[in-house]
């Protein structure tokens, strides 16, 4: 299928925050509660339409483990957008955002659009990071912010599409 634009996205964040689940929910409209750790990178793609233009999103889902960090850095090249993901039920994943953001800014082009995503919003009862904290971090660093649930599909579509609108 023909498209007017191709936008490369990279999904980054600690291991276990739901990066692969967000990708699967966006590309296949399904949730897989258990899957193997991502080794290196996995890919997904989907066509979307913005202002009547077909845009292909090529999405790179990266490994969150520290041991893959040096490989992952090369994936930033040519990325128009990044989804920086943390798990609202795990404070440590939020605390590591600064490191991920520094990596992203250092290894990508300066006008890459970054959306901060607080994932697993369906687990409200286990929340360790308040929504306001995510909003404040995003504001402070000039990021777009959204909370999502890959499990219920809440805001998943919007996260990918709103990032594309910012790029477009």
Image: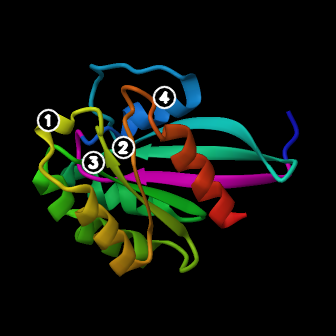
Mark 2 or mark 1, which is nearer the start of the sequence?
Answer: 2
For the residues bearing labels 4 and 3, Cβ distance under 8 angstroms:
no
Q: For the residues marked 2 and 3, what is the alpha-carbon distance in whole angstroms?
A: 9 Å
Which stretch appears magenta?
A: 4-16
Colour pattern: rainbow
Q: Residues within 10 Å of mark 4 (few under 14, many from 20)?
A: many
Q: Which mark is residue 25?
A: 4
Q: Disc 3 on helix, strand or loop?
A: loop
Q: Nearer the viewer, mark 3 or mark 1?
A: 1
Residue under pointer 3: 64
142 left or right of 59 in image: left
Query: Going from the N terminus, do you reach mark 2 or mark 4 first?
Result: 4
Find residue 40 and name its label: 2
The residue lying at 30 percent from left, 65 percent from top is 100
**Mark found first going from the N terminus, 4 or 1:** 4
Q: What type of secondary structure mainly makes up the magenta span?
A: strand
Whole-Å distance between the Cαs marked 4 and 1?
A: 22 Å
Residue that mark 1 sits on: 125
Label whose residue precedes the other's in the sequence (2 or 3):
2
Quarter of the rendering occupied by the C terminus = bottom right
Label 3 Cα crowd, 10 Å radius (few <14 / some 14-19 / many 20+): many
Determine contact: label 2, label 4, CB under 8 Å.
Answer: no
């Amino acid at each position: 299928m023909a498209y007017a634009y191709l936008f490369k996205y990279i999904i980054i964040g600690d291991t276990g925050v739901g990066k692969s689940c967000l990708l699967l929910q966006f590309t296949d409209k399904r949730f897989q509660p258990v899957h193997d750790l991502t080794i290196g990178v996995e890919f997904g793609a989907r066509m979307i339409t913005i202002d009547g233009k077909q845009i292909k999103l090529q999405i790179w889902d990266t490994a969150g483990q520290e041991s893959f960090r040096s490989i992952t850095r090369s994936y930033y090249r040519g990325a128009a957008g990044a989804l920086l993901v943390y798990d609202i039920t795990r404070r440590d994943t939020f605390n590591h955002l600064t490191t991920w953001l520094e990596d992203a800014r250092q290894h990508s082009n300066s006008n890459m659009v970054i959306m901060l995503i607080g994932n697993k919003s369906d687990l409200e009862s286990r929340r360790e990071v308040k929504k306001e904290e995510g909003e404040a971090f995003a504001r402070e660093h000039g990021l777009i912010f959204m909370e999502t649930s890959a499990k219920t599909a809440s805001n998943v579509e919007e996260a990918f599409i709103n990032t594309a609108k910012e790029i477009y």
